[in-house]
Amino acid sequence: MNDIALHITQIGQELPAGTRLVAVSKFHPAEAIMEAYEAGQRIFGESRVQELVAKYETLPKDIAWHFIGHLQTNKVKYIAPFISLIHSVDSEKLLSVIDGEAAKCGRTVDCLLEIHVAQEESKYGFTPDSFREWLAGNPLGKYPHVRVRGLMGMASLTDDDRRIDREFGELKRLFDEVKASGKVDASVFDELSMGMSHDYRLALQHGSTLVRIGTSIFGDRGY
Ligand SMILES: *Cc1c(COP(=O)(O)O)cnc(C)c1O
């Protein structure tokens, strides 16, 4: 077995039933993706539209592509026809553009709303409080071509496991609160995307259903 296949298998064995692996293949070539594919992996995560579209066009059509990076509204149209899940919806503006592009291709696009819980400054993601406030106005009904499937978040980049633990815990509590709030369709609100190479084991302890792992599968991206 090659290294990529081995890593896919080993990580897979750590995941509880109901948690899926998103193999983050950004900056890695098609050959690396195919090694993971041959090992049975079907969900791949990318963070740049151009790179994702190029890979989508050349790689097997039964791959479920997930978009995990910051998505500019003017690029939504390139991925709307085929994207399986957008993890990183960080504004109502983006949600409305996805809704419009999805409608044009006769699709309903699955999305997660990105919540900012880490200590680092970020332009992207709702803070938990701004998210609660926004949701209180019942915004989602305006976007019938978007299906909000859950939340996504990143913990701080730190060696302090207690901080990471606290942040994933906060995200999980927010997820449970929102699911019970009546502001989302609870019957499809079932994904909590959290955990990367260095912190996915902590994320699993807090009920992550999608771990997004790149480096531990494919090695360094060289930046
Ligand atoms: C790159 C990236 C990952 C994967 O990170 P690794 O540390 O390589 O596992 C996960 N989530 C997001 C949003 C990313 O941009």
Image: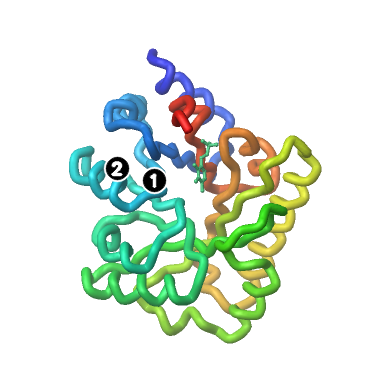
Q: Residue at x 32, y 53 (%)?
A: 49
Instruction: Tell me where residue 161 sits by quadrant.
Output: top right
The yes-or-no answer for disc 2 within 8 Å of ligand 1 is no
For label 2, the SS is: loop
Q: Residue at x 19, y 39 (%)?
A: 58
Q: Nearer the viewer, residue 173 or 213?
A: 213
- Residue 63 numbered tag: 2
Q: Is residue 174 above or below residue 196?
A: below
State whether residue 8 appears in this view.
no
Q: Nearer the viewer, mark 2 or mark 1?
A: 1
Identify the residue under disc 1: 46
State whether residue 177 appears in this view.
yes
Question: What x and y, as percent, mark residue 102?
Answer: 29, 70
Q: Residue furthest left?
A: 58
Question: What x and y, as percent, mark residue 171?
Answer: 67, 57
Q: Is residue 138 above or below residue 70?
A: below
Instruction: Tell me where residue 62 sits by quadrant.
Output: top left
Question: What x and y, as percent, mark residue 44?
Answer: 38, 41
Question: What x and y, as percent, mark residue 111?
Answer: 44, 63
Q: Amino acid at mark 2?
A: Ile
